[in-house]
Image (tube, helix red, strand yellow):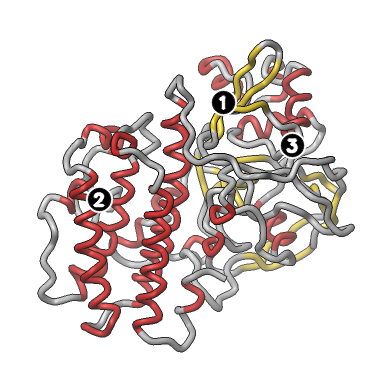
Amino acid sequence: MTAADRVVGTPGTHPDLAEIYRRVRRATDWICEPLAIEDFVVQPMPDASPTRWHLAHTTWFFETFVLKRCYPGYHAFHADFEYLFNSYYNAVGPQWSRPHRGLLTRPGIAEVREYRAHVDAAMAELLGGAGEFDRDVVVLGLNHEQQHQELIVTDFKYLLSCNPLKPVYRPAKARPIGAVPALTWIDGPDGVVEIGHAGGGFAFDNESPRHRVFVDRYQIASRPVTCGEYLRFIADGGYRRPEFWLADGWNAVRERGWVAPLYWEERDGEWWMMTLSGIRRVEPAEPVTHVSYYEADAYARWAGMRLPTEAEWECVASSHPVEGNFLETGHFHPVAAVAAAPGRAIQLYGDVWEWTQSAYAAYPRYRPVEGALGEYNAKFMCNQLVLRGGSCATPRTHIRASYRNFFPPDARWQFSGIRLARDA
């Protein structure tokens, strides 16, 4: 159950929501604790934003969509911040260029923290009963901030990987290492099934409406693909054999020089990987991560299998509890699986986002919300693929079976991995 589930659709008072607000904002601060001042500013690539920008943008959301609209007498912290920290809401106004966010050396991190404190104080007054507000928008803002908590982790990892010193974000915690559970096959529900958010708590609009789909007989793998299994794909010439690759994927392999997942490098015949705890040898028992859709699809073809559809994935995941290795666990990396009961899948939630073969598109009868907030999901329903299940950087209270993440097929800097499926 998400933090928002404790509020929407259940009895509660404004102070209850105020405590959830404080908890989410404190979690963002905790993620940033190990960072040096210099770490907050740099943008290593167009898709990865500076941490300072994430801190300001999540604050901008509450100022723009809650305080300016619902709290008479609220004074904006800075007149230009609506422009500087607007991500993509055209209905709000123009935005600073996304690829150039790293050029904004001002405001500095100290002023951004003052901005957060200014907005937090006003939100505390509003949520404490000082005025009327749209509860659903506040809850959306909290879930929006949780999304950016994950982005802070993944964007910062990419930044550290660019440094030849391979800095450590947080020291590694003890993690389970042992024999990999045998991969078995689980029969998923078939026929006419229902997918999508069933109500009873928060969900993004792209998870609705719940609707019927036909799913033919299939089986889904009991666990994600491991690094050891992926190493066999590499050793068998997986990155040199075009027969496994989609045309766009093969172009990416050749043009970008892909020979392994992102953050892997070969040293004296051994594979090493960059983690948020520094560089170390690739652990064969851990789920492989930082692979694109193209790589996931190529591996599945090499293995004689395929990727699941998002309907198949959700039908299986809906019968499993939301538990696993999430942000709060503190590993900041996928961990090796442990055995599960026969007929049950493991690591459906947490560890790695799992690519599906489904294009990110609107569900039947989908209608985005009116106004600027309708841009949150709807405008990206093109040229993206759906991922499911969350990752080791996803907050535990943020994920559910119906959650639909989406990225372009060449994206690799997220903690994305592979779960196989096959026809039955």
Q: CA distance from mark 2 to mark 3?
A: 39 Å
Q: Nearer the viewer, mark 2 or mark 3?
A: 3
Question: Left or right: 36 with respect to 378?
Answer: left
Are the residues at dot 1 and dot 3 in contact (C-beta closer than 8 Å)? no
Q: Amino acid at mark 1?
A: Asp
Are there few (<14), some (14-19), or many (20+) residues within 10 Å of tag 3?
many
Q: CA distance from mark 2 to mark 1?
A: 32 Å
Q: Nearer the viewer, mark 2 or mark 1?
A: 2
Disc 1: which residue: 248
Please state the horizontal and vertical placement of residue 193, each as a whole percent of the image: 72, 66
Mark 2 vs mark 1: which is more N-terminal? 2
SS assignment at label 1? helix
Mark 2 vs mark 3: which is more N-terminal? 2
Disc 3: which residue: 226
Disc 2: which residue: 86
Please state the horizontal and vertical placement of residue 258, each as a whole percent of the image: 58, 19
